Amino acid sequence: MERLATAVPPIEDRSKYLRELAGGFEKGQIFLTALELDIFTLLNTPRSAREVAETLEMLPHITYRFLDVLAGMHLLSKNGNTYVTASDVAPFLVKDAPYAARYLNFATKSRKSWMQLAETMKTGPIEKAEPHDHEYDQPCIDWMARGTLLGRLQGTVRHIKELPEFQKARKLIDLGGGHGLFGIAFAQENPDSEVVIFDKPEVISMTQGYIDRYEMRDRVSTMAGDYTRDDIGSGYDIAFEACSFGGRGDEALSFYRQVAAALKDNGLFIRLTFTLDDDRSGPLTSLIWDLKEQITGHSHMHMRTTSELYETLAEAGFQQVRTISTEQWSKMETRLIVARKIPG
């Protein structure tokens, strides 16, 4: 008979992984509840569990256990009976902090949809999706600018400037440029270029502020409008767009044709965007987003596989050049899609 002490396990034990998947709901609920209660702002100043319970009118015996879990998740630091928001996440979780993670509000609002997932897969979205439109004010644009400088811009520009076409480019456009930092960086890296930042009229005045701050008024200009409908100019060597276009349906083909018409022959269209693997095996974050779009009825960011995106680009007059994963320099699972305008 086989000795039990030396028996080889018949299969790999995956129970811990499955428990972690199931427990992810609990951790997520605890975290989102902390956000709703604004615990991290309250604990930007050290307080005891009793003080937190009194301030928020909660039961002390549950509150201190709740705070202990947050400390175990490394969101709070604990010293004796006192809790404070952990210093490494405070800039992202304290209200009105420089890098406050505004996008987490979407997660708190979508909890109901996820709880109804089984029913939705049988009947479709239970509630009619409300129109969604971002409001861009100065605090929002400044927040986006700070966030893009956490590595996303630096890595993106570093790879784009290595393209032979970039150093030869003399005229570039940054579509939906917002703060304009990508376009400004392009102008800095290519001193022989002129860059146009295109965005909505209410945004362009804020863009100009960043252009002035970086003293690039002589080579970086602005243009206002809706790039899915309005003229964006012509004669560009490179058109760049970073996560500003949702890519919905026929609007995508129309937009890509608009870009193609604005580019010179053999000009590059570079998109920093989300795509799915061709076999739809990842990235996981994009797969989850794609599912969420279906169960909520929203269409904030229409997900396509990389090949599907290139097929639409080909229909608009582009050929594939290369796809660059940004995972080495960005926390977002985006990709740089580089396409070339086919001479017509």
Image (tube, rainbow, N blue to C red):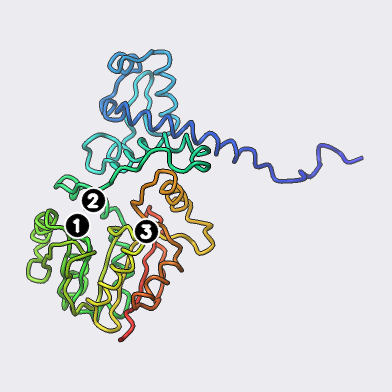
Q: Quadrant of the rendered structure where residue 212 is?
A: bottom left
Q: Please report the residue visible at 28 percent of the width from the left and 76 percent of the height from the top.
A: 260
Q: Which residue is mark 1?
A: 178
The residue lying toward the viewer, choosing from 200 and 187, is 200
Badge 1 amino acid: Gly
Q: Nearer the viewer, mark 2 or mark 1?
A: 1
Q: Does any portion of residue 212 appear in the rendered image?
A: yes
| Helix, strand or loop at mark 3 | loop
Spatial separation of the CA atoms under disc 3 and disc 2? 17 Å
Q: Which residue is mark 2?
A: 144
Badge 3 amino acid: Trp
Kindly identify which numbered label has been placed on residue 329. Answer: 3
Tell whether label 1 touches label 2 (CB within 8 Å): yes
Task: Left or right? Give the position of 32 relative to 9.
Answer: left
111, above or below 225, in the image: above
Sequence-earlier tag: 2 or 1: 2
